Image (cartoon, rainbow, N blue to C red):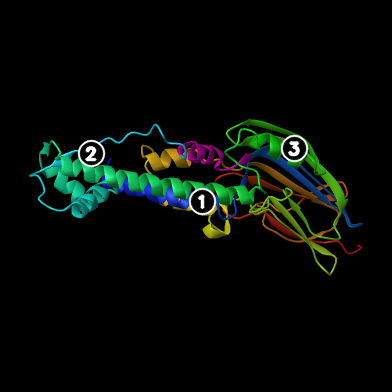
Amino acid sequence: MRAGGRMGMRILAVAAAAWMLTGCLLSPGKFTADMTVLRGGGFSFAYKGDIHLLGLSQLIAMGAALDDSKAEFTPSPCYGEPAEVDAAVLKTAYVQEEQGSEDSEDWAEEALERECTPAEIESQKEAWEEQRAAKKAEDAKNIEIFKAMLGGIDPTSPDAIDEFITRIKKQKGWREVVHKGDGLFTVDYAISGRIDQDYSFPTIEKVQGITPFIVATARANNAVRIDAPAFAAGGQTSFMGGNMGGLMSILQAVGSSSNSEEAKIFANLPKPDGVFTLSTDGDILTNNTEDGPSVSGAMRVLEWKVNARRERAPEALISLNPA
């Protein structure tokens, strides 16, 4: 692989790790979501469709990699004349080659491959062992961070999914939760109550770092603001704030070619795909739909089509003051 490709993959890995561990634990997939807000203060919300627990397969792979007793060292090719330098210089040269240094790769292409000396092989092995130990330590650290975000559930445990589902089903509203594999859940959620205080979906007991799909904020003037932060794929919200769109923007910048490894990973990321409908008999003060409200009986209806092209998260401000 060329140096640029290796560097792109490293940028991608760093971006994905930062994103996964800074607040975008769950992501919507294909879904329908409906919310009703009434002047009398009542509300209902329903979500039916996919929810992705992001990074689960990568975390499982990290856990498996911690036990790498069967890992074997394979020497890298050597080029040019045998280097008459000490082991530290040889190790530095090896690490540079592994990291995709353009200078070292260009030099390697011009030189002839040869059999490595025992000193060079020993130096390569020493560098390999150091890198393996560093990776194991980093993987273990990331797993512990994610475990804390999941409220103590070990994502590498074979019982992790069952524990996750059991915790969810203890809460009101979760009528069905089915794991389809690799962190993909199909859910049927519905709840109703009073909008005299804030409401957010999803919230899961002890679990941290969730970017809300829906937030209803009750204001003192009897108005309600509705936001749907996760129902956007654009870059409106900052990357480090945990928005899906920030990562997608970075991935697009790293690799836009349909044949690149970066683009393949980008194409496989879960993307929101659904419709969010908000109905109310209150006064719609502001909204960012394409066509504004429609009328259905006594209700005014707002509809947002949510997909990978939507850059702005749905939002609306509704007054519940008596007509």
User: In what element is the residue under mark 2?
Assistant: loop
Residues in magenta, as a range = 52-65
Above or below, 61 relative to 105 = above
- Mark 2 and mark 3 lie on one chain; the one further toward the N terminus is 2
Image point (70%, 38%), residue name: 163
Q: Are marks 1 and 3 in contact (CB under 8 Å)?
A: no
Q: Position of residue 284 (x, y in %)?
A: 78, 59
Image point (74%, 41%), residue name: 167
Judge by depth and name the residue closer to the eye, 180 or 281: 180
- Mark 1 and mark 3 lie on one chain; the one further toward the N terminus is 1
Rounded to the nearest whole Å, what is the CA distance between mark 2 and mark 1?
A: 29 Å
Judge by depth and name the residue closer to the eye, 6 or 45: 6
The amino acid beneath tag 1 is Lys
Q: Which residue is mark 3?
A: 166
Q: Which of the two marks, 1 or 3, is nearer to us in this view? A: 1
The amino acid beneath tag 2 is Ser
Q: Which residue is mark 2?
A: 76
Quadrant in which the N terminus appears = top left
Whether residue 198 is visible to the viewer of this picture, yes or no, is yes
Quadrant in which the C terminus appears = bottom right
The amino acid beneath tag 3 is Thr
Q: Position of residue 283 (x, y in %)?
A: 82, 60
Rounded to the nearest whole Å, what is the CA distance between mark 2 and mark 3?
A: 48 Å
Q: What number is the disc on residue 13?
A: none
User: In what element is the residue under mark 1?
Assistant: helix
Above or below, 239 relative to 70 = below
Seen in the image, is 105 located left or right of residue 60?
A: left
Whether residue 234 is visible to the viewer of this picture, yes or no, is no
Mark 1 residue crowding within 10 angstroms, few (<14) / some (14–19) / many (20+): few
Q: Which residue is mark 1?
A: 141
User: In what element is the residue under mark 3?
Assistant: helix
Mark 3 residue crowding within 10 angstroms, few (<14) / some (14–19) / many (20+): few
